[in-house]
Image (cartoon, rainbow, N blue to C red):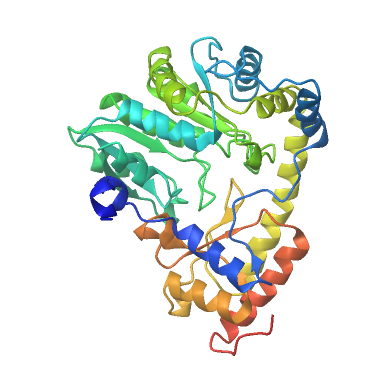
Amino acid sequence: MDYNRFINDKIRTVKPSGIRKYFDIANEMGHVISLSVGEPDFQTPWHIREAGIDSLQRGKTWYTPNRGFSELRQEISKYFERRFNVTYNPDTQILVTVGGSEAIDGAIRTIVSEGDEVLIPEPSFVCYNPLTRLADGIPVTIETKAENGFRLTAEELESKITPKSKLLILPFPNNPTGAVMRKEHLEEIAKVVRKHNLFVLSDEIYGELTYGDTPHISIASLEGMAERTIVISGFSKSYAMTGWRLGYALGPKEIIEQMTKLHQFAIMSAPTTAQYAAIEGLRHGDGDIEYMRNEYNIRRRLIVDGFTRMGLTCFEPEGAFYIFPSIKSTGLTSEEFCTKLIKSRRVAVIPGTAFGDCGEGYIRVSYSYSLGHIMEALNRIEMFINNPDAPAMDS
C-alpha cells in the first residue's frame, strides 16, 4: 500500500525531537549515565500519592467534567493568587489538561490561524515550532544571547514584529538555558506586546523552580496583561508528578472556552486519579516544593562549579533544572560532542541544536539527578574533554 498518500504532509515535515535520539542511544547501549532527561528524580510526595490511591480504593474512577473537577480548579485559582498574585475565576478561566503539553497545543490551535506569525524565543523547548506549523502558523525565531542571560529583550522582540505577528511564546524559566525573566524585563516586554496588540502564551511550568531572593513573576500579573495572556503550567516539575500527566491553562474566559472545545473532542477529560492527587498537592504541598527546590539549588551549584573547573564557558542558570554550557572551545559541534561523549564515556547529554539552530556550540545538561550521579557524570565529561579521542570505556 502507498502510505504516503494517506499521511498529512504537515506532519511529515515535523522532525522527531533531538532529545529522543540520545535517550534511545542510551537505552540501546546500556550502563549509560544520563543527564539528558528533564524529569525530577524525586518520587511524588507520599501524601500526594496517597490521595490518588485513596481515590482508587473508593472507586472514584469515572470521567470528570471536561474542564476538570471544580474542586481542583478552585485550588489552582487559590494557588496562583497565593504564589503569583494573579486571580482567575475557577468556573470560566481555568482548564485542566493532560499535561502542560496539551495546554500548549490547545492554546496555539485556538489563537493561531493560517498565516499568523508566532514569535518564539530560542533556545527553547522543542514543541513550540512544530505545533505552530501544525496549526498553519508561521514560526518566527528570536535568538536570545548568552551575554543577555538568554533573556528575551524588548529590542529583540520589536525587531521581529510584522503586521502578521499574533502570538508571543514566553518560555521562562527556560528549558534549556535556565534563564529567567525578572519583573523589570517582563515590564519592557509587556510594553511591546501592548503596543502591537499581541497575545502571549506564557509557559510557566518551571515557575516554582527559581533560585535566589526573587521569586518567579508571571507576566499575567502586570497591568493590562491578564486579558492577553494564556498561562500554561502543571504538576510535573514542581510536584515531581511527570507520569501523572496533569497540567492546566489559565486565561481569558473567551479563550478558555474555545480551548475547552478542543479538549472535549480530542481528550474528554484529564485523568481522574491524577486530579485527586493534585488537589492534595495544591493544598498541602508547598513544603514539598521548597524542599525539592533547595535540593536542586545544591545540585545547581555543584554542576556550575564542575563545568567552570573544566574551563567551559557556563552561564549560571537561575531557574528550572538545566545548565547550558558552551562547548565551542572543544572545536566540536554540539552533535559531535554529544555523540562522542556517549560512545566514549557513556554519558548522555543533549546537543543545544535540539532547542533551535542558535543552540549550536552548546549542550543541555539536566541536574534533576542525585549528587552522586552528577559527580560521576562530571568526572567522565572532564576526562572526555581532556582526551576526546580516548578509546571507549568498558560498560
Q: Position of residue 38 (x, y in %)?
A: 59, 51
Q: Nearer the viewer, residue 393 or 202?
A: 393
Q: Residue at x 78, y 25 (%)?
A: 284
Residue 92 appears in the figure: yes
In the picture as drawn, the residue positioned furthest to the left comes out as 163
Vertically, is 357 above or below 236? below
Quarter holding residue 47: top right
In the picture as drawn, the residue positioned furthest to the front comes out as 1
Q: Residue at x 24, y 30 (%)?
A: 113
Q: Residue at x 66, y 17 (%)?
A: 75
Q: Quadrant of the C terminus?
A: bottom right
Vertically, is 217 above or below 70? below
Q: Position of residue 28 (x, y in %)?
A: 59, 70
Q: Nearer the viewer, residue 57 or 11?
A: 57
Residue 204 appears in the figure: no
Q: Is residue 234 left or right of residue 183?
A: right
Q: Position of residue 6 (x, y in %)?
A: 27, 47
Vertically, is 210 above or below 191? below
Q: Is residue 362 left or right of residue 281?
A: left
Could you tell me how many numbered marks the image carries? 0
Q: Position of residue 121 (x, y in %)?
A: 37, 45
Quarter holding residue 52: top right
Q: Nearer the viewer, residue 233 or 21?
A: 21
Quarter holding residue 98: top right
Q: Is residue 282 left or right of residue 47?
A: left
Q: Quadrant of the N terminus?
A: bottom left
Q: Residue at x 52, y 65 (%)?
A: 22
